[in-house]
Image (cartoon, rainbow, N blue to C red):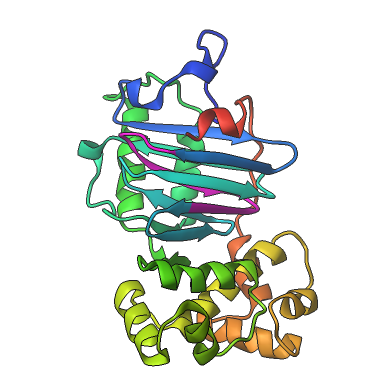
Amino acid sequence: MPIIQCETIDCKRTAIDDIERPVIALGASRVDGVWELEMHQHRKAQLIYTLQGIISCELEQGVWVVPPQCAVWIPGGLMHSARGTGVNQCYCLFVEPEAGRNLPTTCCTLSVSPLLRELLLHAAHFPLLYDEHGAEGNVINTLLDQLSVARVEDLYLPLPRDNRLRQLTDGMLQDPADKSTLAEWAGRIGMSERSLSRTFAHQVGISVHRWRKQLHVILALQKLSKGTSVQAVALDLGYESASSFVTMFRKAQGKPPARYLSDCANCQESPMQGGFSLSESMG
């Protein structure tokens, strides 16, 4: 990303926190669409936005998934890792803490409106040291205004603190098609079924049943965005038929998976000019 002029700047060594601007927009492309960043942190808050493919971001308290035309917001100072699948084009916005205008104080997945999208893509072409008090600064201010009213999407998997409950969530993540009952899971991790249910809901905020459905929605989006058929996704996640999977997805997201992805992709992609690799710019 940015679509920075890298002729006079060593982009690989450019430290985001050292750039003397309250907001920085960057853009990047990658041919194979796959990248991964280890746990790291920076002072500036970060917005990661993809035009296609899926981005997942993990913090200590949970995992966020970012389908096309959505973005993940990561407040400054938080340790996080990120992974992209099928992401050939991606954009980042870095925001100094004092520049935030009623921006989220916790990590979340945001819906990106067409206006916010165009502002972000436009700002990614600014030089690093853009004119804060001129036209470029006005665009940045409008971008922040639009970001502050972006809708939060429910695409998040909170993780429990209890090590025994983490065995349960880790097991479901490793084998999402597992149909074990709560009683069976309770026996495996050394808890009573009642204690498991009560402690999980207290620490995570939702029931085990709802958590599993949310996991299936996230995994389904990852698979479907790569072209996997609904039938194959349903079987991979342990559903007896495609229709039963679609029913679950519609109840969770308000629309069937094909419609959900279609709505996400309504905005046409814009060609990128210049830039550098994702792994060099997104940290």
Q: Is residue 1 visible?
A: yes
Q: Looking at the image, how many numbered discs can be counted on the residues? A: 0
| Left or right of 124 on screen, residue 76 | left
Q: Tell me which segment is drawn in magenta.
A: 40-57
* Picture residue at 34% right of the left edge, 21% below the top: 18
Residue at the far front: name it.
190
Q: How would you classify the magenta stretch by its main secondary structure?
A: strand
Q: Position of residue 107 (x, y in %)?
A: 36, 55
* Picture residue at 50% right of the left edge, 35% below the top: 282
> In the figure, residue 94 lies in which quadrant?
top left
Q: Position of residue 12 (x, y in %)?
A: 54, 19
Q: Is residue 127 above or below residue 63?
A: above
Q: Is residue 2 visible?
A: no
The N terminus: image quadrant: top right
* Picture residue at 40% right of the left edge, 26% below the top: 16
Residue at the far top: name it.
8
In the depicted view, which residue is nearer to us: 139 or 144? 144
Q: Position of residue 257 (x, y in %)?
A: 65, 75
In the depicted view, which residue is nearer to us: 231 or 118? 231
In the depicted view, which residue is nearer to us: 110 or 188? 188
Q: Is residue 205 above or below residue 88?
A: below
Magenta run includes residue 47: yes
| Left or right of 72 on screen, residue 54 | right
